[in-house]
Every structure is written in structure tokens, then in C-alpha cells.
Amino acid sequence: MTEHTTTDKTLVDAGTGPLSTEEFWDARYRAAERIFSGRPNDALVRETAPLRPGTALELGCGEGGDAIWLAGQGWAVTATDVSSVALGRAAGQARAAGVDDRIDWQRHDLAESFPAGTYDLVSAHFLYPPEPSARERILRRAARSVAPGGVLLIVSHAGFPPWEQAPDPDFVFPAPEQLHAALGLPPEQWDTLAAETYERPATAPDGRPATRLDNTLKLRRHPDRARAL
């Protein structure tokens, strides 16, 4: 799974003090040969199956599992991440899979910069910037990147995992309907294709099977009424 997330409010290295978001994620990826499984997220596979391949933007691509799968299905993908280490690793996996010519890897701290253009699919799976208030701003920018007739797919956690020992009591996991409302999208320009909370199997850090609750919000921008948001 590509769960490129952090709920840390402060990124700190005990030896050097505060880290930038890029430094934090680079260090995390350098700590292991592989962080994620390399498989695409189940929700991505399920929700994009009915779509005709076109252009796709993936936000927070991590080691590239989702981007590589989309490219294999015929999508032309722009994949972004804040970590240069993750992007280098993802590009190597794409070459091994024979789809490197279909993916444009771009480094962005999405709270600071964003890919140009519009896309038939904009996908954000488990995207949690270090500063929680930045998330809605990033996702509103993501909505502006959806081409007329295109789809915005946001998959997020509905709560902390069952193995979390000390969950942050101040961290909020909005329901799909709450996130939809927070994005402030004009209802006459968007259709809701999915807004649901569901269980999925997961694996705890100690290897034990577990269950997580996730949310999916899937919206389609009207092809004939799309205007600047």
C-alpha cells in the first residue's frame, strides 16, 4: 500500500532540531529499502476501473505503487512527492515495470508548490501534510486541477489504527461529507460519485492482522459547466 502519511505537527531530529518536510521524509525512506508494498491501493483500483485512461495527477506518490499501476493501465501520469529519495526509488521501479515513459516524476512540497495543468484524474491517497491546516488548502488546489469531465479521488483514514498507543486527541479525521463541505466546491459544477466509510484489512507493525476504517470521496467535475473555482 502507498500510505504516504504523517500526522506529526512538528518534525524533529533529536540531534539537529526541526527538520523540513523533505528532510523528514527523505530520512524515513532512507531508513529501509522499501517502506510500502509496491501494490496499488485497493481503493484506487476499485474507483478508477470504470474510467477511460487519460491524464492523471497523483499527489504524494511515495515509492510509486499507484502511479506505476495507473501507467500500466494506460494513463499518462504526473506523480509528485516531497521526498527526492522516494521519487528516485519510484522511478527505478517504473523502469523495471517498463512504464517509465508514461510517468513524469515531480518533487513538490504541496503546501508550497503544485504541478501545473489540468488532469482527467487527480488522486490523493492518505495525504496528510505535517501542518493539518494545509490539507484542505492542498485539496482545494487539487480540485482546481481537475479537467472538465474529470474525477477527483480522495482516500483518507477515518481514524487512528487500532495499534496506535497514544493517538493525538486533537487530530481530526473528517468524514467524507465533512471534507466535501470543507472544499467548498460549487454544487452545480460537481457530481458526487462516492462518499463512504468502509473497513479494509491491514497489518500491524508487529505483523498481526488488523482492520482499518478508511474514507473515499469521489467527485466528477461537470464537462459543460466547469468554470474557474
Image (tube, rainbow, N blue to C red):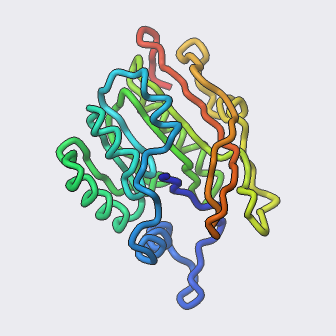
Residue 200: x percent and y percent? 64, 43
Circle count: 0
The one nearer the camera, 205 or 92, is 205
Q: Residue furthest top?
A: 224
Q: Residue at x 29, y 63 (%)?
A: 88
- Residue 219 higher or lower than 69, as above or below: above
Residue 140: x percent and y percent? 54, 36
The one nearer the camera, 85 or 92, is 92
Residue 101: x percent and y percent? 17, 45
The one nearer the camera, 177 or 47, is 47
Q: Residue at x 39, y 22 (%)?
A: 51
Q: On the rendered structure, is 15 left or right of 107? A: right
- Residue 65 higher or lower than 130, as above or below: above
Q: On the rendered structure, is 159 left or right of 60? A: right
- Residue 83 higher or lower than 2, as above or below: below
Q: On the rendered structure, is 76 left or right of 195? A: left
Q: On the rendered structure, is 172 left or right of 119? A: right
Q: Residue at x 50, y 26 (%)?
A: 229
Q: Residue furthest front?
A: 208
